[in-house]
Image (tube, grey):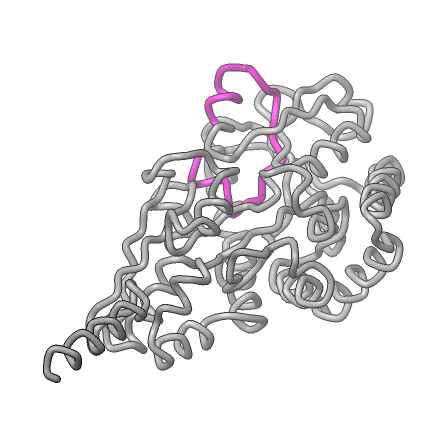
């Protein structure tokens, strides 16, 4: 009888998830991303998120952060790494994997976003309604955009559309590349960590990079000219970002720890990421370039209007792309713009 009881208990234990932690055991979350440890995303988003869940769990949850792709792979592979359970959490640009997030990349269209806080909230709400399936296999924690791309150049000032013609300019994603091509430049799609070397060696003439991304690659030491849209206008372009967790890892946590993760996720977390990590970085990072004596140029309203008109076909191409996949592109574009307006007031 005792032997039967032991066997029954053993069989029951075998059915328990292998990853289920013992009560009170500290759980290490492997967090992977593609920028240096000193970069703004780690310092002002990833580390604070980790600190918060550690504090609220009385250190039962702890992050081990691996910056700069230390666990291997390339930035476009980060989404698959968290989906496949290679790592527990990633911060990434999902659209580095071109074509896989076509409905979500509406927020990368030219002149869409005015500030990171409002754009990040709009992105989260839009994806919850219209594009959750694009992130299937992961558990999104928060989503955000950046503060808006600025045109940084090494040796030639740009003041008009004509000045852009023939210049090789870095684009972050395929939508960014389409915008640059519409403006007359030659787009070169590169992840951020490759930009500084490409500019310093003359492989590209400039780059579309937000002010937030400049210090991590010391772009202010390479670029001499910076071109911005008018102060209250929508930014040139943007990129979507994702902080996501492996669903199996999430489900393996005790209910109280899942609740802590949930409390650091969603709309409010997305808004805070955009505001604290990106909007707040603009002026301090612009100052780095000013202090080096770099040249700044703000497009006059009339010239800015020419840039906007020149890129109208990029919106049209996006609508056609998503319609080929069976979705109402015009409705999705209109809804994205409405959400941006709603949250950017």
Residue shown at 87% from the left, 35% from the top: 310
Residue 70's place in the image compared with 331, above or below, is above
Query: Farthest bottom residue?
Result: 1
Q: Quadrant of residue 344?
A: bottom right
Q: What residue range appears in magenta? A: 196-218
In-image side of 29 versus 280 (left or right): left
Q: Where is residue 325 in the image (x, y as percent from the top left)?
A: 81, 46
Residue 344's place in the image compared with 212, above or below, is below
From the viewer's side, name the closer residue of 237 and 156. 237
Residue shown at 65% from the left, 61% from the top: 132
From the viewer's side, name the closer residue of 311 and 67. 67
Q: Is residue 208 magenta?
A: yes
From the viewer's side, name the closer residue of 107 and 78. 78
In-image side of 128 versus 19 (left or right): right
Q: Position of residue 151 (x, y in %)?
A: 65, 35
In-image side of 296 versus 90 (left or right): right
Residue 36's place in the image compared with 185, above or below, is below
In-image side of 342 versus 81 (left or right): right
Pick the quarter of the image with the N terminus: bottom left
Query: Farthest left residue?
Result: 2
User: How many numbered tags mark residues here?
Assistant: 0
Residue shown at 68% from the left, 42% from the top: 228
Pick the quarter of the image with the C terminus: bottom right
């Amino acid at each position: 009888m005792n032997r039967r009881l032991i066997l029954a208990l053993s069989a029951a234990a075998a059915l328990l998830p292998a990853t289920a932690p013992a009560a009170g055991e500290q759980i290490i979350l492997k967090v992977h991303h593609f920028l240096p440890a000193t970069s703004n995303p780690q310092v002002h988003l990833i580390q604070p998120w980790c600190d918060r869940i550690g504090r609220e769990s009385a250190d039962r949850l702890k992050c081990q952060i691996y910056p700069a792709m230390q666990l291997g792979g390339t930035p476009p592979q980060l989404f698959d790494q968290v989906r496949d359970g290679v790592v527990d959490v990633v911060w990434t640009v999902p659209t580095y994997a071109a074509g896989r997030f076509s409905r979500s990349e509406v927020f990368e269209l030219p002149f869409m976003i005015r500030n990171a806080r409002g754009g990040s909230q709009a992105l989260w709400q839009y994806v919850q309604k219209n594009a959750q399936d694009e992130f299937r296999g992961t558990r999104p924690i928060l989503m955000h955009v950046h503060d808006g791309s600025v045109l940084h150049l090494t040796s030639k000032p740009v003041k008009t559309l004509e000045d852009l013609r023939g210049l090789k300019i870095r684009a972050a994603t395929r939508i960014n590349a389409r915008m640059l091509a519409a403006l007359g430049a030659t787009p070169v799609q590169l992840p951020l960590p490759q930009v500084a070397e490409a500019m310093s060696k003359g492989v590209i003439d400039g780059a579309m990079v937000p002010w937030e991304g400049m210090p991590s690659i010391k772009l202010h030491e390479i670029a001499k000219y910076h071109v911005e849209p008018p102060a209250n206008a929508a930014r040139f372009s943007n990129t979507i970002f994702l902080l996501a967790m492996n669903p199996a890892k999430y489900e393996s946590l005790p209910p109280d720890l899942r609740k802590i993760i949930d409390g650091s996720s969603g709309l409010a977390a997305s808004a805070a990421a955009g505001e604290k990590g990106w909007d707040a970085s603009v002026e301090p990072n612009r100052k780095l370039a000013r202090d080096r004596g770099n040249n700044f140029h703000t497009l006059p309203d009339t010239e800015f209007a020419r840039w906007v008109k020149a890129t109208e076909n990029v919106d049209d191409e996006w609508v056609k792309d998503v319609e080929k996949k069976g979705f109402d592109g015009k409705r999705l574009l209109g809804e994205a713009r409405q959400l941006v307006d709603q949250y950017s007031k």
